[in-house]
Amino acid sequence: MQYLRKTDPVTLSIIRAEEKRQREELMLIPSENYASRAVLEASGSVLTNKYAEGYPRRRYYQGNTNIDDVELLAQERAKKLFGVPHANVQPYSGSPANSAVQFATLEPGDTVMGLALASGGHLTHGHPKITFSGKFFKSVQYNVGKNGWLDYDEIAKMAKREKPKLIIAGTTAYPRILDWKKFSQIAESVGAYLMADIAHIAGLVVAGAHPSPVRWVHVVTTTTHKTLRGPRGAMILVTARGLKKDPDFGSKIDRAVFPALQGGPHNHTTAGIAVALREAQGKLFKTYGKQIVKNAKALAESLMKKGFELVSGGTDNHLMLVDLRNKGVSGWVVAWALDKAGIILNYNSVPFDTNPPMFPSGMRLGTPGVTSRGMKEREMVRIGTWINEVVEHVKDEKLPGDKEQRTVWTKAFLGRVAKDRFLAKIRGEVRSLARRFPLPGIDR
Ligand SMILES: Cc1ncc(COP(=O)(O)O)c(C=O)c1O
């Protein structure tokens, strides 16, 4: 970055600090990952300079020959990799992609049915009142059962009762395999569109580590920056089943992205997506996807052996949701203590949580990032041990129930953990381990 060093050393120093942080800490947030050098190069290219409203060969701006080529390339690779007849690679991110599908399939006031946020769904799946989908449509939300698993009989009953026009199947904090066939039967029984949001698991689907929804649903949305390891972006994939339901469905999706919701596509991101899709075609990526799941199972096992309770009793995919109530400590406290120890995950509500979302009872963690760095089961056991040590260390830190007291307490707690010697010792051990595994995209 020799030019940045000369022209804007302040920005460069922030970027370098973030590289160091990523190199020395353990990235366990299940929605994060490392892009390859090639993806970073394509995403940082001159393609960012161009306006290209419209679609290949149908642009509203001149000078788009090369942009057309890169978008067609990304589309073709997406279609081949996922086995779909139509791909839109323009959504700026996962949320706009989900909004576009709802815009294409629903009229204001129509019913959309998705998994509740508190049960592991995403905000864009119809979360009431505060989101686009919850505000403009009639949103009904299903939940996981008491055991933390999706209850397909309950979902079927709700669909029969509410007659949604669109059903969304997809999760952001659910550790089990999704049964696409069952979702499909439910959607068919009420004549609804079925959308699979595979933002979290796209890389697992490509690797064969999670069943593909393509045969069963009308449309698939995915981000490109999670298990797929591309740049921050998204895709909408229309399936053969989708085109059978409505031969114009592909065009409706395209029109919902542009001009309904977006302007010019981010062509540099499109190039990064094309590169990531090529990387995902290879044998290595299949091995990678399978290792993510092996690592998650090893980490889950290590935690459960130490008395941690995992929602649903374990994991079949890349993530786990830990209910900390039996440990008597808040997810907020644990996540911040781990942050100081260099172990980065996020505090998260667990299903039927008795605590508020800002101070929930659980933590969510996953293995896509550490697997990208080349870590295996052995390292997962080590990480499980560190997590346990940190939880034991902060177990007696009790968040006050009273709001005002809590504000004072949380500030004091963050000050305490920042200076905590034990957490600093773990941080040193974490750093030594992390440095043995190169930072993808940066370290050679
Ligand atoms: C299942 C799911 N869908 C959609 C999104 C939204 O993606 P973005 O944050 O890129 O808008 C997320 C984000 O984490 C997600 O987990």
Image (cartoon, helix red, strand yellow):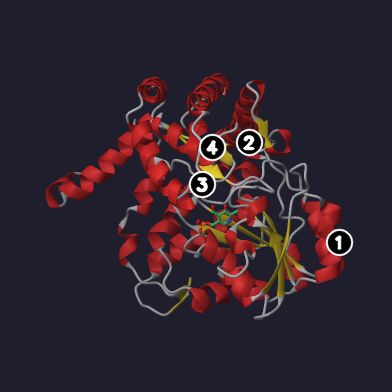
Q: Position of residue 133 (x, y in %)?
A: 61, 70
Q: Secondary structure at mark 4?
A: helix
In the image, what residue occupies the spot 57% across and 51% down? 356
Between disc 4 and disc 3, the foreground one is 4
Choose between 94 and 405: the one closer to the eye. 405
Q: Which amino acid, by three-letter code, is at mark 2?
A: Arg
Question: Which residue does the numbered mark 1 point to in the structure image?
Answer: 157
Q: CA distance from mark 3 to mark 2?
A: 43 Å
Disc with the residue nearer the chain's start (3 vs 2):
3
Disc with the residue nearer the chain's start (4 vs 3):
3
User: Mark 4 and mark 1 in contact (Cβ < 8 Å)?
Assistant: no
Which part of the image, by quadrant, shows the N terminus? top left
Disc with the residue nearer the chain's start (2 vs 1):
1
Q: CA distance from mark 2 to mark 4?
A: 26 Å
Q: Which amino acid, by three-letter code, is at mark 3?
A: Arg
Question: Which residue does the numbered mark 4 point to in the structure image?
Answer: 368
Question: Which residue does the numbered mark 2 point to in the structure image?
Answer: 325
In the image, what residue occupies the spot 53% across and 62% down? 95
Between disc 2 and disc 1, the foreground one is 2
Question: Which residue does the numbered mark 3 point to in the structure image?
Answer: 278
Q: CA distance from mark 4 to mark 3?
A: 18 Å
